[in-house]
Image: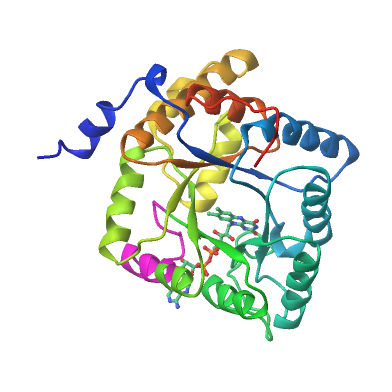
């Protein structure tokens, strides 16, 4: 008999035994200023030798970064060996506009889209579909697939999307997105490996067999993480808050704690069979690089294959 999930996780390998048999992907956001542009490309250059499966670039609320997302993704295609994935949302766009964006990506050589409904442009408002647009991610996936044969990733919520009525309806929705043509689901960030495993079990019971990739947020700024977590309904455990208590003026110690916490969660997820981790880098390489290193990955001079 299998030990209970939590015990199974603890029984996993030590860092020293991790062989690097994992895939990673990294998420970036499009820069707003020259200085941000510089730190993004520094992060990209640092992480490229880890040969990620893909790197994704977010799409700002309300399509506010449409051009910047495109420019960042196009530069990744031209100047790196990386495989970029462009995030795209339904917010404030007609189906015709989405077709135009999809065509431009296809022409630029982009073959992977992270298809999302998106959050409302203004915080606190409910999502309202564009009168000629898509009303949810599942219909966006369907539309994109009809236009071009993109590889498509979709979003998943181990602790439930805040607007979903129940776990079951959230899982039904996830299944619709995957059935419409999604290849994998990338999860919202979370801080409990057990919560992810419970979600994975529930997804399997709902007939979902596509890969569920955990989204890992290395926490270096606790206050900012609290804001993100409040907005998307992620449970922020008391132990995490206590770990960061008193470190406000100790940025180096904060980074060490952040890398340790995230690497430990990845180790538990690894013990439960996870072999692909998606890192929310916030355009900073250091933490993701350190965590990949602890998971046994080593850079390769040749870049991605
Ligand atoms: P959907 O899958 O359409 O679901 C939205 C809600 O509606 C859910 O509660 C779902 O259960 C419910 N629902 C949908 N259809 C039905 C139905 N038929 N019946 C009942 N309920 C239904 N946002 C951005 O703006 N830009 C980004 O770049 C971005 N990247 C992200 C990347 C990842 C990995 C994740 C996890 C999220 C990202 N987001 C991004 C946030 C995302 O846009 C929000 O979480 C948004 O509120 C939901 O998007 P979705 O694609 O999951 O929507």
Q: Residue at x 77, y 48 (%)?
A: 30
Is any atom of residue 165 visible in this view? no
Is any atom of residue 100 visible in this view? yes
* Relative depth, front residue between 226 and 153: 153
- Residue 111 percent coordinates (x, y): 67, 62
Q: Residue at x 83, y 49 (%)?
A: 78
- Residue 96 percent coordinates (x, y): 75, 82
Q: Residue at x 39, y 41 (%)?
A: 274
On screen, 129 above or below 86? Answer: below
- Residue 89 percent coordinates (x, y): 65, 66
Q: How many marks?
A: 0
On screen, 175 above or below 247? Answer: below
* Relative depth, front residue between 214 and 53: 53
Q: Is residue 266 left or right of residue 2?
A: right
Q: Is residue 192 left or right of residue 151?
A: left
Magenta-span inclusion, residue 217: no
Q: Is residue 274 left or right of residue 89?
A: left
For the C terminus, which image quadrant?
top right
Q: Is residue 300 left or right of residue 139?
A: right
Magenta-span inclusion, residue 173: yes
- Residue 176 percent coordinates (x, y): 43, 73
The region drawn magenta spans 158-174
For the N terminus, which image quadrant?
top left
Q: Residue at x 45, y 59 (%)?
A: 161
Q: Which residue in the rendered view is the most extreme toward the bottom?
A: 132
Q: Which residue in the rendered view is the most extreme toward the right?
A: 34
* Relative depth, front residue between 113 and 21: 21
């Amino acid at each position: 008999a299998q030990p209970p999930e939590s015990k199974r996780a603890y029984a996993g390998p030590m860092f020293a035994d991790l062989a690097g048999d994992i895939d990673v992907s990294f998420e970036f956001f499009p820069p707003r200023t020259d200085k941000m542009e510089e730190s993004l490309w520094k992060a990209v250059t640092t992480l490229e030798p880890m040969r990620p499966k893909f790197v994704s670039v977010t799409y700002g609320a309300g399509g506010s970064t449409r051009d910047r997302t495109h420019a960042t993704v196009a530069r990744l295609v031209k100047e790196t060996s990386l495989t970029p994935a462009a995030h795209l949302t339904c917010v404030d766009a007609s189906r015709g506009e989405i077709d135009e964006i999809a065509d431009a990506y296809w022409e630029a050589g982009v073959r992977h889209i992270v298809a999302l409904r998106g959050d409302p442009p203004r915080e606190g408002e409910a999502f309202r579909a564009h009168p000629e647009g898509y009303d949810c991610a599942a219909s966006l996936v369907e539309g994109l697939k009809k236009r071009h044969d993109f590889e498509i990733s979709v979003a998943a919520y181990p602790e439930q999307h805040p607007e979903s009525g129940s776990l079951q309806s959230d899982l039904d929705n996830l299944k619709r997105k995957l059935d419409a043509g999604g290849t994998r689901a990338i999860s919202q960030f979370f801080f409990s490996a057990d919560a992810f495993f419970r979600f994975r079990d529930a997804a399997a019971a709902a007939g979902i067999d596509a890969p569920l990739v955990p989204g890992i947020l290395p926490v270096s700024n606790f206050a900012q993480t609290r804001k993100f977590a409040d907005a998307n309904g992620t449970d922020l455990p008391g132990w995490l808050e206590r770990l960061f208590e008193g470190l406000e003026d100790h940025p180096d110690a904060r980074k060490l704690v952040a890398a340790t916490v995230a690497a430990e969660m990845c180790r538990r997820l690894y013990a439960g069979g996870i072999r692909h981790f998606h890192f929310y880098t916030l355009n900073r390489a250091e933490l993701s690089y350190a965590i990949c290193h602890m998971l046994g990955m080593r850079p390769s001079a040749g870049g991605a294959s």
